[in-house]
Image (spheres, coloured by chain):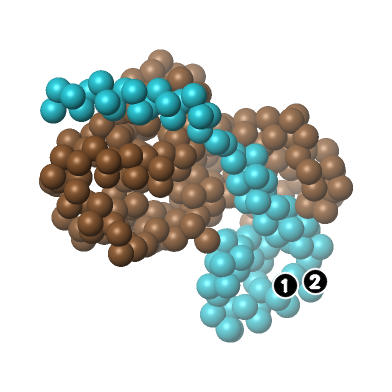
Chain colours: A brown, B cyan
Amino acid sequence: MNTITTGDPEPLLVQRLRDGDHGALEVLMERYASRVYRVAHGITRNAPDAEEVVQDVFLKLFRVIDAFEGRSALGTWIYRIATNEALNKRRGKRREVEVPIEEHLPSFQADGHREGDRGFLLADWSASPELVTLTAETRARVREAVDALPDPYRVVLLLRDLEELSNEETAEVLAESVSSVKSRLHRARMALREMLTRSIPA
Amino acid sequence: MTCKDAIELFSEYLEAAVDADTLAGLEQHLRDCPPCVAYLNTFRRSRELAREASEIEMPPEMKRRLRQFLLAHLRDS
């Protein structure tokens, strides 16, 4: 579980950063660069943009460290900067029209049963031996499905299920309520499941 | 409990965040509903796949460029 904690060294790190110590930035890089990159890549969906985001995030970290009040863990703060920078980068690009999440969600009949033919309803590919070790093709299909989620849904899925932040940490990163995070996360997961059930052969 | 109700609970179920009464109702529903069992299994696996497929490493070259970038820009500050 990748819980962010303020371990003992971090207040010291923050202080050293405030003092303009570049070595402290190096330590932060070692600790967080991969995570920032992963989030940036998940949000922007391409490596060159993700790389720019990582550079901007660490530069910004160093410059705005005085604004860090220590009310949240340093990691949470870094994730927040990374998420916002990545989302800004996304917004700046001409994009394809996003499919609304509702189109990816399961539909239900009036009596509460799921809609769909019997084969689809019973489709259970979870134990498929082909998924034990992911082929490049399956990996690509899964990534495509995640990428197809509208940004607000993809972001919450990335933070919760990939970065393994808690609901509370995610809510802090996104400056939202926990209930908003939970509700959007569940819809993101449902949408992902629907897409994968269609694209992964049973 | 309908399938719609059950599915609505699956995130919490996977995180062991369902209260005892609701859990009993959910487990009863799952005993009688193969489509919901299929849904739950694939729901769980989808989460895992998302993580496995998205485990992306920052290339060493990129880390080097990051270091160079910061050195160049921090000189000005």
In the rendered view, would you say A167 is above or below A21?
below
Density class for disc 1 (Cα within 10 Å; few <14, some 14-19, many ≥20) is some
Q: What x and y, as percent, mark residue A108?
A: 65, 52
The residue located at (74%, 58%) in the rendering is B41
Q: Are the numbered discs 1 and 2 placed on the same chain, yes or no?
A: yes
In the rendered view, would you say A74 is above or below A5?
above
Residue corresponding to mark 1: B29
Q: What x and y, as percent, mark residue A197?
A: 74, 42
User: Does residue B44 appear to the left or right of A103 in the view shown?
Assistant: right
Q: Which of the 4 image quadrants contains residue A194?
A: top right
In the rendered view, would you say A89 is above or below A63?
above
The residue located at (70%, 35%) in the rendering is A139
Q: Between residues B72 and B2, which one lies in front from this camera angle?
A: B72
Q: Which of the 4 image quadrants contains residue A32?
A: top left
The residue located at (45%, 35%) in the rendering is A37
User: Does residue A42 appear to the left or right of A139 in the view shown?
Assistant: left
Residue corresponding to mark 2: B32
Density class for disc 2 (Cα within 10 Å; few <14, some 14-19, many ≥20) is few
Q: What x and y, as percent, mark residue B54?
A: 59, 39
User: Does the residue at mark 1 contact the one at mark 2 (Cβ under 8 Å)?
Assistant: yes
Distance from label 1 to label 2 (Cα)? Answer: 5 Å
User: Does residue B12 appear to the left or right of B49 in the view shown?
Assistant: left
Name the subunit of mark 2: B
Instruction: Kindly state the secondary structure of the residue where label 1 is placed.
Output: helix
Q: What x and y, as percent, mark residue B34?
A: 81, 62
Res A59 visible: yes
Q: Mark 2 is on which residue type? A: Asp
